[in-house]
Image: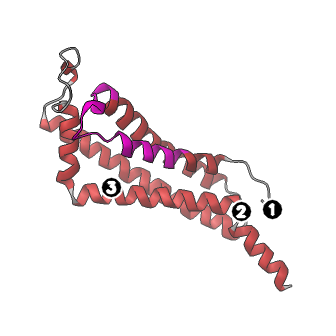
């Protein structure tokens, strides 16, 4: 009897739903800490957003500089929107983690957890892929800046969320 219950625990905690719980929780924690840091140390990344949008540390190519946004009000509005998006994605992922944990512990249907995780992870991918890589990196030429270049960090965030999304979306069978 003890052997069979031990196998049940191993199967439960070593299965794909438990892995999906772990990766969803990890990204949720990460996003909560990112949002918390941006709220409690508002000025640091506020400067980052201002410099990226102003394009003031790029090559100053006249063909591109028309894209620059030098208004602090517009840059600060964009920064607050980023923080709101980070916070919302963290809340969605934390809720998804709770749904996953319930499904794993009760051997229930993970479809709600999978859907919530997918939403939260896609939000993270949109923030760092569309927001930082596409808009910041290409439109505002952030790649040209030695001082204000967040492309490496954004790439790590995309990798973390993307791999997590793959784990969450993998089909699983009972007993996996």
Name the spot of residue 27 as percent of width and height, x first.
48, 56
Q: Which residue is tagged 1?
A: 175
Name above or below for residue 134 compared with residue 171: above
Q: Quadrant of the N terminus?
A: bottom right
- Cβ atoms under marks 1 and 2 closer than 8 Å: yes
Circle on res. 151: none
Q: Is residue 163 magenta?
A: no
Please name whichever residue, 58 or 67, is drawn nearer the observer in this view of the structure: 58
Q: Is residue 51 above or below residue 115?
A: above
Residue at which label 2 appears = 15
**Magenta stretch?**
138-162
| Visible residue check, residue 93 | yes
- Identify which residue is drawn at 21% across, 29% down: 58
Disc 3/disc 2 C-alpha distance (Å):
31 Å
- SS majority, magenta: helix
In this view, which residue lies farthest toward the bottom? 2
Nearer to us of marks 3 and 2 is: 2
Mark 3 or mark 1: which comes first in sequence? 3
Q: Is residue 173 left or right of residue 24?
A: right
Depicted 67 relative to depicted 17: above or below: above
Give 144 or 30, whichever is nearer the viewer: 144
Crowding at dot 3, Cα within 10 Å, few <14 / some 14-19 / many 20+, comes out as many
Identify the residue under disc 3.
Answer: 35
């Amino acid at each position: 009897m003890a052997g069979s219950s031990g196998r049940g625990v191993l199967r439960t905690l070593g299965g794909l739903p438990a892995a999906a719980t772990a990766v969803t929780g990890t990204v949720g924690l990460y996003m909560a800490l990112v949002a918390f840091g941006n709220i409690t140390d508002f000025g640091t990344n506020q400067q980052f957003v201002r410099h990226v949008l102003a394009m003031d540390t790029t090559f100053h190519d006249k063909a591109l500089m028309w894209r620059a946004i030098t208004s602090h009000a517009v840059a600060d509005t964009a920064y607050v929107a980023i923080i709101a998006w980070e916070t919302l994605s963290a809340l969605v992922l934390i809720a998804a983690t709770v749904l996953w944990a319930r499904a794993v512990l009760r051997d229930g249907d993970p479809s709600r957890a999978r859907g919530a995780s997918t939403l939260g992870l896609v939000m993270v991918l949109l923030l760092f892929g569309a927001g930082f890589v596409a808009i910041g990196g290409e439109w505002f030429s952030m790649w040209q800046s030695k001082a204000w270049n967040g492309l490496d960090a954004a790439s790590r965030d995309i990798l973390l969320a993307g791999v997590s999304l793959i784990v969450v979306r993998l089909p699983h069978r009972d007993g996996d």
